[in-house]
Each structure stands twice: as structure tokens, then as C-alpha cells.
Image (spheres, grey):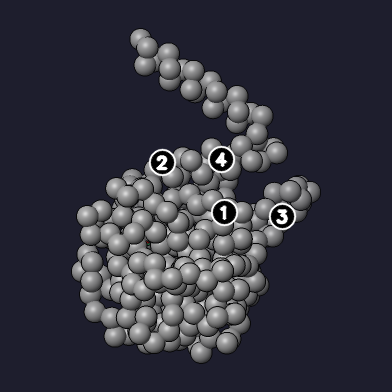
């Protein structure tokens, strides 16, 4: 079994749920407090031992590439000012030259298609897939246990958590077929079923660890839900040749693809930061009181 050292970040999506903010800014660059979602995702991957970061990008996403490049002007100004804290904040997380690979998805044709676009960058190795709009904390915890599961068993691995029964139409949903000490053995998986058709409430959240053969499955996957090439359909097809294990999320997940999830992540992260907790508590309290007053008048 090859070690998992590469992660694929599909970042070509349009981000229509956050318009107008995402008209000219990639959704992956939206910040939670002061850090863009994509930086959380890259740091999480690095925390889990990932060494090569493959971005599947597209039109209008150059801000992501710029974010991970050196900004000479900014860095020399911060150096001159002796502002080490700010300087470190723009240099610490940066992968080295050659550790980030950019591939283009020419047309948006679905998540499965986006992952397949990374096939040449993956080579013959197993790989992780990270969807940056699912923010997972503590950083690296879930991905590390998924990588361990894959390296120990050879199974493809997805991360799941129990979702509201009314929300099955937002997720890939797995059918549990058995269990090991560390994972649920998946007997089927379906993309975004209605609550009436959902086989369970175990929803896939945006972390995957795959054997290289998933790329071959994707190559022969036709269009599915939403007329897109779905990663979920390739996973369903792979069940006949390789087991699929679902690891239950051991930490917290914020759905930053939605406005409320973004708000929840922002409030939570602010309250967890030593430099912000006191002031954040005050402004949140004041906003709640003002909101109550407004509702009463
Ligand atoms: C994608 C996947 C879905 C998964 C979800 C997790 O859907 O297709 O199976 O449950 O990510 O966030 P999307 O949210 O891109 O519509």
C-alpha cells in the first residue's frame, strides 16, 4: 500500500451560494476571521502529513495561486517594519516551490470530473481529496485517521457524520453494511437522495482517501445527479473491486458552503482565539441584546 502524500483540492466551482461576494473572488478565498478557507484546508492537509498539494482550478481563480506565492513587496515592507507577527502570517503556511501543482478543469462538469482532472499529477499513488468549504477542526485530526485507515486496510475511505434526516438531499449518503473497530463498512453510496429514499442519515463530508484505481473508475463514470460526473457514482462503482470504509468524523465540521455554517465557523474560531475571545464575547453579547431589543419593539 502506498503512503498517502498527495491531496487534491477541487477549487474550480462557481460558488453561486455566496453571490455577490464570489462574483470576482473565489469562494475558497472567503475568510473565517482572517484566514481564507483554502488556507485552513492546506494547513489541515500538511498537519495530516500531506506533502504535495494538487489544486484543480479554473477561470477566475488566480487569487488562490497568488495567495500561495511569495508577495515580495508586502514581505519586504513587513520586514522593514520589523512586524514579524504579520510577516510570519503570510509566510508560515506556504508550501515550498514545486509542492503545489495546479491543473485546470476546462469546463465545470462535476466533482468527479474535477478529481479526475488531477490524474496525471497523482501518478500511481493513493491520494486524499479535500473540499475546502467543509472546515474541520481540530486541524488534521479526521484526515490523519482516514489516512491510517487506508494505509492499514487498503480500503477507500470517506468521512461521514450523522446528518439531519431532512438534509439527506445535500449529501452523499452511505448504506452501512457492517463495522470494524475503526470504521463502518459501506455496502452502497448514493448522491443526494431525498429523505424518503435515503438509506441512512450517514452523510459524506468533504474528505476522501482513495487508492489510485479511483481515477480509473472516474474515467468510466457517466453523468449522474444534476447532469454532472459525480464522485459518489465512481465510489459506488468501486465497491465491486475494493472495500469502502466510512470513518466517523472525530472532530467538528462547519459547512462553510452555506451562510449559516460560515457564521458559525467565524463565531467559533473567534471565540477560540486568545487574541479575540474577550472582544468577540463582548460584541456577540451586544449584538444579541440589540437583536432582542429590536424584536421586542
Ligand atoms: C459534495 C459531494 C457530496 C458530499 C458533499 C460534502 O457535494 O458531491 O457527496 O456529501 O460534497 O460537502 P456539494 O456540497 O459539492 O454539492
In the image, taking residue 111 as reference, residue 40 lies left or right, namely right
Question: Which of the marked residues, 1 or 3, is nearer the chain's N terminus?
Answer: 3
- Residue 61, quarter of picture: bottom left
Badge nearest the viewer, 3 or 2 = 2
Task: Decide which of 273, 93 is in the foreground and name it.
Answer: 273
Question: Which of the marked residues, 4 or 2, is nearer the chain's N terminus?
Answer: 2
**The furthest residue to the bottom:** 124
Any mark on residue 251, and which?
1
Q: Which residue corresponds to mark 3?
A: 88
Question: Which of the marked residues, 3 or 2, is nearer the chain's N terminus?
Answer: 3
> SS at mark 1?
loop
Q: Is mark 4 within 8 Å of ligand 1?
A: no
Please determine whether, in this image, residue 126 is positioned above or below residue 79: below
Distance (Cα) linking label 3 and label 4: 23 Å
What residue sits 23% from the left and 66% below the top?
225
Q: Position of residue 154 (x, y in %)?
A: 53, 83
- Residue 98, quarter of picture: bottom right
Distance (Cα) linking label 4 and label 1: 14 Å
Asked if residue 130 shows in the view, the reply is no
Please determine whether, in this image, residue 105 is positioned above or below residue 141: below
Task: Tell me the quadrant of the picture where the C terminus can be found.
Answer: top left
**The furthest residue to the top:** 297
Any mark on residue 260, and which?
2
Distance (Cα) linking label 1 and label 3: 27 Å
Distance (Cα) linking label 4 and label 2: 12 Å
Q: Position of residue 189 (x, y in %)?
A: 33, 69
> SS at mark 3?
helix
What residue sits 33% from the left and 45% below the top?
20
Q: Which residue corresponds to mark 4?
A: 268
> SS at mark 4?
helix
Question: Which of the marked residues, 4 or 1, is nearer the chain's N terminus?
Answer: 1
Amino acid at each position: 500500500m502506498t503512503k498517502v502524500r498527495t491531496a487534491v483540492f477541487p477549487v474550480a466551482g462557481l460558488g453561486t451560494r455566496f453571490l455577490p461576494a464570489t462574483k470576482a473572488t473565489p469562494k475558497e478565498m472567503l475568510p473565517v476571521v482572517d484566514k481564507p478557507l483554502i488556507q485552513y484546508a492546506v494547513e489541515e492537509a500538511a498537519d495530516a502529513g500531506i506533502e504535495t498539494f494538487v489544486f484543480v482550478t479554473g477561470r477566475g481563480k488566480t487569487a488562490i495561486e497568488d495567495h500561495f506565492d511569495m508577495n515580495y513587496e508586502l514581505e519586504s515592507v513587513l520586514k522593514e517594519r520589523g512586524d514579524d507577527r504579520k510577516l510570519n502570517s503570510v509566510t508560515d503556511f506556504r508550501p515550498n516551490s514545486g509542492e503545489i501543482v495546479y491543473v485546470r478543469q476546462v469546463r465545470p462538469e462535476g466533482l468527479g470530473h474535477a478529481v479526475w482532472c488531477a490524474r496525471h499529477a497523482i501518478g500511481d499513488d493513493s491520494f486524499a481529496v479535500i473540499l475546502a468549504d467543509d472546515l474541520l477542526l481540530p486541524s488534521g485530526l479526521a484526515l490523519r485517521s482516514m489516512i491510517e485507515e487506508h494505509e492499514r486496510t487498503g480500503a477507500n475511505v470517506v468521512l461521514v457524520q450523522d446528518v439531519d434526516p431532512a438534509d439527506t438531499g445535500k449529501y452523499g449518503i452511505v448504506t452501512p453494511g457492517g463495522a470494524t473497530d475503526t470504521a463502518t463498512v459501506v455496502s452502497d453510496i448514493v448522491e443526494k437522495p431525498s429523505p424518503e429514499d435515503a438509506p441512512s442519515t450517514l452523510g459524506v463530508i468533504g474528505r476522501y482517501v482513495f487508492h489510485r484505481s479511483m481515477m480509473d473508475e472516474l474515467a468510466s463514470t457517466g453523468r449522474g445527479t444534476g447532469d454532472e460526473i459525480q464522485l459518489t457514482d465512481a465510489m459506488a462503482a468501486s465497491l465491486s473491486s475494493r472495500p469502502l470504509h466510512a470513518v466517523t468524523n472525530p472532530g467538528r465540521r462547519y459547512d462553510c458552503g452555506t451562510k449559516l455554517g460560515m457564521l458559525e465557523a467565524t463565531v467559533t474560531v473567534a471565540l477560540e482565539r486568545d487574541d479575540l475571545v474577550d472582544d468577540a464575547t463582548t460584541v456577540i453579547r451586544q449584538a444579541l441584546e440589540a437583536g432582542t431589543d429590536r424584536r421586542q419593539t
